[in-house]
Image (cartoon, rainbow, N blue to C red):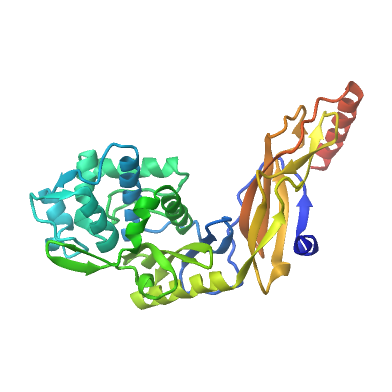
Amino acid sequence: MEFRRATLACILGFVAALGAIAPAQAQLFETKAAQAFMIDAETGTILFSKNPNQPIPPASLAKLMTMELVFNAIEAGRYSLDDKFVVSENAWRTGGAVSGGSTMFAELNSEIRLEDLIQGVVVQSANDGCIIIAEGMAGSEENFAALMTERARELGLTQSVFRNSTGLPAEGQMVTVRELVKLALHIFREYPDFYRYYSQPDFTWNKITQRNRNPLLAMNIGADGMKTGYTEESGYAIVGSVARDDRRLFVALSGMTSERERAEEARKILDWGMRAFEKSELFAEGETVGEAQVYGGAKSGVALKANGPISIFVPITNRDRLTARIVYEGPVIAPVEEGTQIGSLRVFIGETLSQETPLYAAESVDTGALHQRALDAVGELLVGWLR
């Protein structure tokens, strides 16, 4: 708590209309990646951000969304791991051995269990596996891609657009590293029984054994996921996760020039994320974070608190870079009911928005007497002129 009081500059204010915080590069670490985004899984702290909202072709990283649809369908009881899907000629030609791309070597007209297809896609990055699943679940890959985009919106991924299940180049198919990290974290949290496939070292199908394409798994750094990708347009990319010392980090990087550079940059940023930050409790559970101005109320302000403690990972060597502000649309109009969401606490490391936590009314504020409302009206009129 002493750390918070000494270094956290908490600026209480209100804005008539909230705008998006402009993305800024963290100055604590340098990476060769053109786009990068890394978070702490427990607190949601953004540890690094570089061009996180820039649209990029997903390449094989699109298969994360393909698998999310599969996992969700199994969890909902629509499919089971033992269901079988037929290998069509389209899947065989577009994604099979004859295509020259990543494949699980599925044989034309054969039937494959869904669990084997999942392992083919996750471990071997099999394009044929993706198409077989897409056609089996939605009738066509086009239909399945539409479901992928629809599901992305349900998960709050507002920029991601999918045109196929594989990530093969297609006009208009785009993702961002921020949304890839959000998707990866969602898969980890919602599908623990399926997430384990991402750390599987190899998979054998059609008598051909292929090792997992994720280079992080062999580095002995606690990595257990998730996916690599490559396109000529955006270079080499990766979504990775590391669990170590009771912490878990997720990172997405894109725009690297080689497989070697991708592996090295991913290792370096994850290792830095584990070593360069320590956890600090900014506010205890139930503690008042600040106050919002109330218009026409029995009180001039309402205390704000979060639904639980607010903790963040802060730079060990740059603690003075931590600042925060309470942001809300205001003034808040009385009456105010306890528990109503009023705004949020935005915490910054340098210029990077590192964490945003919803804030709620810690008390109820009734409508004030006539003379109080009149005074507030005059005050708001004067402030309005200043605005």
Q: Is residue 4 visible?
A: yes
Question: Is 99 placed above or below 15 here?
Answer: below
- Taking 30 as reference, is 159 above or below it? above
Rendered residue at 34%/68% (across/down): 214
Work out whether 183 lies above or below 75: below
Q: Position of residue 182 (x, y in %)?
A: 47, 53
Q: How many marks?
A: 0
Compared across the picture, whether 385 is left or right of 74 comes to: right
Name the one closer to the observer, 21 or 224. 224
Q: Nearer the viewer, residue 5 or 11?
A: 5
Farthest left residue? Answer: 109
Question: What residue do we see at 34% from left, 41% from top?
Answer: 75
What residue is shown at x 72% (from left), y 48% (from top)? 326
Q: Residue 385 sits in which quadrant?
A: top right
Position of residue 377 measured from the top left corner of the image (x, y, whole percent): 85, 29
Q: Is residue 217 left or right of residue 40?
A: left
Residue 284: x %, y % from top left? 72, 52
In the visual, does 310 lie left or right of 178?
right
Q: At 82% across and 28% down in the image, what residue appears?
A: 296
Residue 373, quarter of the rendered image: top right
- On the image, the x and y values in percent for residue 103 come to 19, 61
Which quarter shows the N terminus?
bottom right
Which image quarter is the C terminus in?
top right
Q: Quadrant of residue 297?
A: top right
Instruction: Say whether residue 58 is visible.
Output: no
Asked if residue 351 lies left or right of residue 51, the reply is right
